Amino acid sequence: MTKQKPKKFGKPKSFSKYSNADPLQKTSLLSKVFGNQRKLDDARDSFFSSYDFESNINPMRLISFLLLISTILCITMFFIERSNESIYKSWTYQGVTTIPPSDALDFDLVIEFSKKENFDKCNTNNPKKLLDGICDESLQFVNDMNKTQSRSQVLYIFQFLLMFILFFPLGTFFHRALRNIKTLKYQTSLSPEKMIVWIYFAIFLYFLAIFTARFVSKEFNIAFIFFLVPLSFLVFRIVKTFIEIYKGSLIDVSENLFTTFTLKFKLWITAFIAVLFFNPSTITRFWAYDSVNVGDLIDATKLMYFSSLLLIIFSLLTLAMVVEIYKLQEIKKIKTGSITVDPLQ
């Protein structure tokens, strides 16, 4: 009996795992990356499914940790700016009034600075003469300027990145807090998702205005009005959101809107508005944009460490407010109970 040869076009062994599969199953690369229709349906069903009260303890812990790091960075920034101020003041004691360039490679600016400050020997970029030390005195100021600006910028970048990271746990915390107020029997037609998205959008407009205001106009008044509009919008969205959170989290709600807010929130919103006006981004683009001499540089540095103090206070008040909202909702849940919320009703 001859051995039967396998069919050239036989049914592949791996075909069986697809033959009884869900007809919506996809095997393409795009479906592996972006998911298939069934996953989309599951996500949609979970979005509109009923939900109960959820504890905010884990987001609060992460926020507390990040705010602690932020506070440490702000304290470091404060002392660095104070050190920078001492360096700039020492320049004035030496009779230097012109702000030195921060880049020693741009030697034309170094020579220009030397002429203004009467360092007459430094008048050429000839390498042979530079080796004789004719520009050492000027370059010392340039190096000091580069050092002070570099360490401030590095800390500012870290602070900005940390703030960006904080947006995620803060968004999670306040989104969950907004969902919880409905489970705590508070009647509202506002969507937690939309309210958080509006806040993120307002924050985006705020920073966009900061970085583009001077491109819109070099005139301070016009640029400031351009910046003030998204700032006001951001404050409006924040206050509107917290009105709902506090009304839904307090057991006894006052009819007076001002008394609805607790002392911690009043202090927090005051610090928040102050930070919106005075932070490293606004200082460099508004309050110290036209610095022309060392005296202006010293004033800008004072604003910088003032903003560091504001950020320290703001971080601590943010932590206190987050803890307060968490406690208010947990206490109300214990005393009044909670219900299951169906988004479709």
Image (spheres, rainbow, N blue to C red):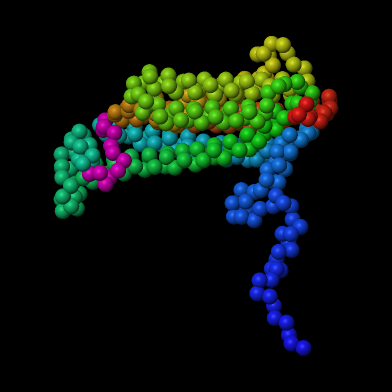
Residue sitting at 73 percent across and 34 percent down? 48
Q: Residue at x 22, y 44 (%)?
A: 107
Where does the image place residue 137, in percent across and percent down from the top left? 24, 43
Rendering coords of residue 116 (x, y %): 20, 33
Q: Main secondary structure of the magenta part?
A: loop
**What span is colored magenta in the figure?**
96-107
Q: Is 47 or 225 nearer to us in this picture? A: 47
The quadrant of the rendering that contains the N terminus is bottom right
Taking depth in this image into account, of 153 and 163 the one nearest to the observer is: 163
Where residue 122 appears, x then y in whole percent? Answer: 17, 43
Residue at the far bottom in the pictured view? 1
Q: Per the image, is 295 magenta?
A: no
Query: Residue at (54%, 24%) from the top-left corner?
Result: 234
Tell whether 3 sits left or right of 166: right
Q: Residue shown at 40%/29% (left/top)?
A: 212
Which residue is more in the foreground, 145 or 13?
13
Q: Is residue 194 shown above or below 149?
A: above
Left of 90 or right of it: where is 341? right
Q: Residue furthest top?
A: 256
Residue 257 location (% of width, % of height): 67, 13
**Position above or below: 131 against 48:** below
Q: Quadrant of residue 199?
A: top right
Describe residue 43's horizontal placement relative to residue 237 as left or right: right
Residue 122 shows in the view: yes
- Quadrant of the image containing the C terminus: top right
Is 105 in the magenta? yes
Which residue occupies the foreground of this view, 232 or 4? 4
Residue 314, picture quadrant: top right
